[in-house]
Amino acid sequence: MDLLRIGIVGAQFAARLHLQNYSRWRGSKIEILTVASRTRARAEEFARRYNIPEVCDDYRRLLDRKDIDVVDLCIPTDLHHEFVIQAAQAGKHVICEKPLTGYFGKERPEDLVGFAVDRKTMFSQAMANCEVVASALKTSKVKFCYAENWIYAPPVVKLKSLIKVSQGSILDIRAEESHSGSHAAYSRRWKTSGGGALLRLGAHPVSAVLHLKHYEGMLKQGREIQVKSVTAEVGRHTAIESFKKESQKWIVSAWEDVEDWATMIMNFEDGSQAVVTASDGVLGGVRNTMMVYLSNAVVQVNINPNDTVVAYAPSPQIFGEEYITEKLETKAGWNFASPDEDWVRGYPQELEDFVDCLLTGREPASGLDLAIDTVQAIYAAYLSAEKGMRVELKKSSV
Ligand SMILES: NC(=O)c1ccc[n+]([C@@H]2O[C@H](COP(=O)([O-])OP(=O)(O)OC[C@H]3O[C@@H](n4cnc5c(N)ncnc54)[C@H](O)[C@@H]3O)[C@@H](O)[C@H]2O)c1
């Protein structure tokens, strides 16, 4: 195969990120043949904007096409596992957005499942979803690329080089993804998101932490260092009475049954620990950060904000429509203006790895194991937060 033919599923935020970052390989390594979305009008608008020759009304029709090699799933989280399974059964390679899956409680249409369902049930169903996905991919012998951009973000790649040359031990990681709340309707309720801030935002730093400890283990002992147990707390800060009374809301507060704050501690088998925080209640633009304390070095990773460009304006109008950074409330005052936010977050590098893997048959840096380990750690954290206890983990057998 020298040209990869891709069908996109979904036509909003994540799909835009992918199309923006596929652009340099279109015509040379890839062709985008079609886009499918729930609403035809939006798919048509998307196709016009990104010069995609055709719109597909139904995902299943996209799977029937012999000329499509790979489907790129940029759809709400509750659809991921079913769509991956169908794609694998149709013999298509899969690129899938984070997180891989979770618990959605479709069998309980009357419930707000985030309030009604115990976390043990959720944990086992989320892992059952992972198992079916893994089995479908194995049977079909197609490749799975897990779209976790943090693995490819240049600051994280540099961190890995520093870890390697230092030969130090990673003792303590503090990682965070936070902002002032998602734009997407699916994120408001557990049935479509599979969880709140911890799953939707925390999936990024949790995957990065897992990846780093796996990397360290491979360097030092030829096998990954696994998470042994997790503890966690979750919160609903937008349910605080004093916040509810405030007339001007600067942060998203439309959550139905999902948490808007979480912190988990990941305890690794070598005795090291990582603290991951995810919040939908943080003003000032998106925060994607990691502090890594090694035995012989300290590395601070600022994906966002970073100070490559720091700009000041006395009024928000001065910078007009110019992009500053994601989820920024005002362009007035001092701000961290991203020169190339997609690049620093690793989106083009991620898609380049996927395209090369699918063309050459090698495995991506971010694949199925990382996707499953992330679901396992996060759902164990939900269980820990519910029970107020540490939850022991086994390496997933999936
Ligand atoms: N890697 C990242 O940084 C990043 C950023 C944002 C979102 N995401 C992930 O991407 C996924 C989508 O998020 P989003 O913000 O783009 O959501 P969104 O709600 O903005 O867009 C979802 C898209 O899926 C389409 N869709 C829904 N049901 C469909 C169906 N049955 N068939 C075909 N299309 C269907 C919708 O029409 C819409 O175009 C989520 O899993 C999210 O976690 C990742």
Image (cartoon, grey):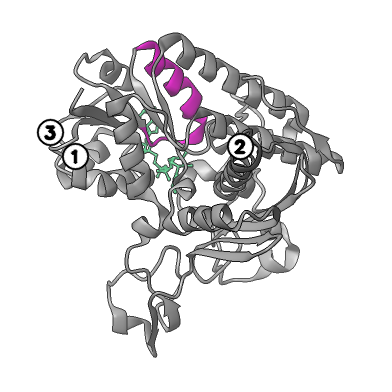
- In front: label 1 or label 2: 2
At 20% from the left and 47% from the top, the residue drawn is: 24
The image shows a total of numbered marks equal to 3
Q: Position of residue 86 (x, y in %)?
A: 41, 16
Residue drawn at 20 percent across, 42 percent down: 25
Q: Which residue is mark 1?
A: 47
* Pointers 1 and 3 in contact (C-beta within 8 Å): yes
Disc 3 target residue? 53
Which residue is the extreme one toward the bottom?
314
Quadrant where the N terminus is found in the figure: top left
Place of residue 37 in the rendered image (x, y in percent of width and height, measured from the top left): 31, 32
Secondary structure state at the residue bearing disc 2:
helix
Residues under labels 1 and 2: Cα distance?
33 Å
Q: Is residue 80 above or below residue 131?
A: below
Residue 80 vs residue 264, the one in the foreground: 264
Q: Which mark is residue 206?
A: none
Residue 316 picture quarter: bottom left
Stretch in magenta: 73-90
Is 108 located above or below residue 312 in the figure?
Answer: above
Q: Earlier in the sequence, mark 1 or mark 3?
A: 1
Left or right relative to 101: residue 42: left
